[in-house]
């Protein structure tokens, strides 16, 4: 039958064949194939050109989205407040930054150390270390929300850069607990292998993290995909106590505050090696980038000072004094005009002008004021602690 059909078509002019639709179908197929190849080529070219273009965030630095006033739409709905965990009185003091006074106070779990914004900026969490709980705060109202969340030994709290996991820093238990940030179910517990694991920050690509071990003078390099410690670095100063960790704007260095060495270490973010040291003041504890990411403020807890580090020149350019103070942890206001710090040993909170370093206010709070949160802060999402934003 097929042969007879082919024989029937043999010798028929092409124009005649088109009447049967065969030539039309062939031509249409060719046109479709040609169009498909052209589209694929165009898409490939576009993808190539896109890959060649530098990412705008990378071009502006790690803190490109945390500049002056760059508060996300969700966080704009929140009240401007400062939340101060008072470790020795098991309370949180709530400060109105405009009035510069405590407007509320509420009890939380035992030994609260830090107040942390959630990755999606929806909630704030008080880390109750000995209470083994997180107290949730609704930032729209500035009040507690719901029952305490059972979490073992939450000294500090972070979130992986992809937002998929929370990392509870269990200092007493010497481990990093990866948990589901919605259910708080334990996903994996990673032994730190050191004493006093407490602060951390993440590489620019979000694949690794550096964690400080305060009581044995070492740093950990953590692979977030494999969820394990892949390297350890011991700092070369007798009795070193590394505390806060912050990534440089260009993503090349980690700055690590050291309470005993009285300064800030520079750690190569790729090779995980010491690249230098910046002398600051006695008891260097907290690190906070300015809103333009040109300087880093280092709080010197036992020295009662704040060192201003020029991040381009990598040197201290100014020192601000807080008479009788013990500046610990805090943050920069959304407009960049004020640096807020807790007074760990004198039950106070300090407000300093970021242009002049002038002490604007000293506000009485509870005993053992520690990892306070200035909120809201600019940024698209939170990596944890007291507002490590990106």
Image: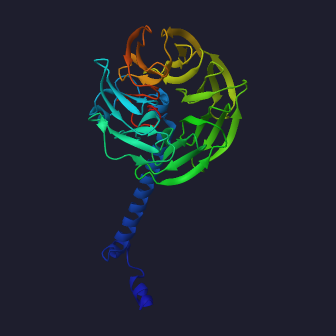
- Residue 223 found in image quarter: top right
Q: Is residue 152 above or below residue 19?
A: above
Q: Is residue 254 visible?
A: no
Which residue: 39% across, 32% down?
91
Observer-nearest of 326 and 274 = 326
Which residue: 69% across, 27% down?
274
Q: Is residue 210 visible?
A: yes
Residue 355 percent coordinates (x, y): 42, 10
- Residue 79 found in image quarter: top left
Q: Is residue 190 above or below residue 349?
A: below
For the N terminus, the quadrant is bottom left
- Residue 84 found in image quarter: top left
Which residue: 49% across, 28% down?
61
Observer-nearest of 91 and 217 = 91
Observer-nearest of 378 and 341 = 341
Residue 122 percent coordinates (x, y): 34, 41
Which residue: 32% across, 20% down?
97
77 left or right of 22 in image? left
Q: Residue furthest front?
A: 89
Residue 388 percent coordinates (x, y): 46, 32
Please state the total of marks drawn on the protein image. Answer: 0
């Amino acid at each position: 039958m097929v042969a007879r059909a082919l024989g029937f078509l043999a010798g028929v002019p092409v124009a005649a064949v088109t009447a049967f639709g065969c030539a039309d179908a062939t031509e249409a197929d060719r046109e479709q194939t040609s169009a498909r190849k052209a589209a694929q080529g165009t898409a490939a070219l576009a993808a190539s050109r896109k890959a060649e273009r530098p990412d705008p965030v990378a071009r502006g630095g790690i803190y490109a989205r945390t500049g002056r006033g760059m508060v996300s739409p969700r966080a704009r709905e929140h009240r401007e407040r400062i939340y101060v965990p008072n470790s020795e009185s098991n309370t949180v003091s709530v400060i109105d930054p405009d009035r510069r006074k405590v407007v509320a106070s509420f009890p939380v779990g035992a030994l609260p150390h830090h107040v942390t914004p959630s990755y999606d900026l929806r909630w704030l969490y008080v880390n109750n270390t000995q209470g083994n709980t997180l107290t949730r705060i609704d930032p729209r109202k500035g009040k507690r929300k719901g029952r305490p969340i059972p979490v073992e030994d939450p000294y500090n709290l972070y979130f992986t850069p992809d937002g998929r996991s929370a990392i509870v820093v269990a200092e007493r238990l010497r481990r990093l607990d990866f948990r589901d940030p919605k259910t708080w179910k334990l996903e994996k517990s990673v032994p730190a292998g050191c004493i006093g694991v407490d602060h951390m920050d993440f590489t620019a690509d979000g694949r690794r993290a550096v964690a400080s071990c305060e009581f044995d003078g070492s740093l950990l390099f953590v692979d977030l995909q494999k969820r394990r410690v892949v390297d350890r670095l011991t700092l070369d100063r007798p009795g070193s106590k590394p505390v806060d960790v912050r990534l440089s704007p260009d993503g090349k260095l980690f700055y690590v505050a050291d309470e005993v060495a009285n300064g800030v270490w520079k750690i190569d973010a790729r090779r995980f090696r010491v690249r230098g040291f910046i002398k600051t003041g006695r008891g260097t504890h907290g690190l906070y980038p300015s809103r333009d990411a040109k300087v880093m403020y280092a709080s010197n807890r036992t020295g009662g000072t704040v060192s201003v580090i020029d991040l381009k020149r990598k040197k201290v350019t100014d020192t601000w004094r807080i008479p009788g103070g013990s500046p610990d942890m805090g943050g920069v206001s959304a407009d960049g005009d004020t640096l807020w710090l807790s007074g760990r040993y004198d039950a106070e909170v300090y407000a300093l002008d970021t242009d002049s370093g002038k002490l604007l206010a000293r506000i009485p709070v509870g005993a053992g004021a520690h990892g306070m949160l200035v909120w809201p802060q600019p940024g698209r999402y939170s990596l944890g602690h007291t507002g490590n934003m990106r």
